[in-house]
Amino acid sequence: MNDDGAVASGETGEPDTPRSDEVKELDVAAPNDAEEGGVADSALQRDVDAVIKRHAVYGVASGVIPIPLVDLTAASTVQMRMIAQLAELYGISFSQQVAKSTASSLLASVIPLTGFGAASFSLMRSVPIAGPVLGLATMPALYGAITYALGRTFAWHFSKGGTFDTVDPKAFRARFTGEFSKARKTEDNVVAA
């Protein structure tokens, strides 16, 4: 081990590996900020972007389901699948329990921004005539933006060497809120971006 805490390449046969507190933060939206900037980094970034975009589309599609609470269940399932696939891309062991509790906490942090609870949004579809119309007008965009923001937040965390064991709720909440606000401002572009 050398002076800065990294394992020297001659000791293990592997390249120098920085300590977790030294891993450079990556902005998931800017793959060129990667330390090495190599082909592997841009290939990983393309794969990450594809997973997030695909699942954001699935999130939008789950918002079209006209049955109250079934849409919410479908969106949650899509989000867990996305997080599992992101973890796999980064070589991180998936923890459904941590992913669910983190996602629920993040969702609770942005629901006040929307003015209603997620279940309230879903249940509004049961109101005759106006409910389905309002649901169709709001739920796809909401579920798409939440799914996109969750993906960006978890990818950001994993890209800096984070795991499910190292989730910092305060940092996650701040990042997720920013990503969600960005996604809401560009709802039309979230799935096309």
Image (tube, rainbow, N blue to C red):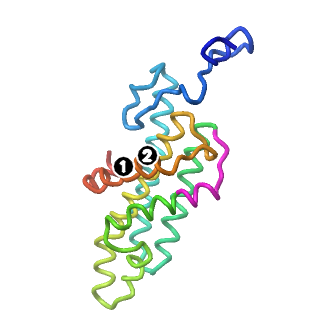
- Mark 2: which secondary structure? helix
Compared to residue 82, the image places residue 123 above or below, namely below
Tell me the amino acid under the disc marked 2: Arg
Q: Does residue 179 sit above or below 128 in this rendering?
A: above
User: Which label is found at residue 8?
Assistant: none
Percent position (x, y) of residue 74? 51, 68
Near mark 1 (Cα within 10 A), the count class, few <14, some 14-19 or many ≥20, is: many
Q: Where is residue 122 in the image (x, y as percent from the top left)?
A: 41, 77
Which quadrant of the figure has residue 166? Answer: top right
Residue 179 is marked as 1
Task: Give the magenta-colored segment's residue range.
Answer: 92-102
| Residue 88 point in image, percent of width and height | 61, 42
Question: Measuring 72% from the left and 13% from the top, which residue is drawn there?
Answer: 13
Which is more toward the observer, 149 or 126?
149
Q: Circles 1 and 2: CB distance less than 8 Å?
A: yes
Q: Residue 152 carries which label?
A: 2
- Does the segment drawn in magenta span residue 120? no
Prevailing secondary structure of the magenta residues: helix
* Count of picture labels: 2
Foreground pick, 58 / 22: 22
Could you say which quadrant of the image residue 165 lies in?
Answer: top right
Q: From the viewer's side, name the closer residue of 154 and 111.
A: 111
Q: What residue is at 33 percent from the left and 63 percent from the top?
A: 141
Between the residue at mark 1 and the residue at mark 2, the CA separation in whole angstroms equals 7 Å
Label 1: state its secondary structure. helix
Coordinates of residue 144 in the picture (x, y in percent): 38, 59
Image quadrant containing the N terminus: top right
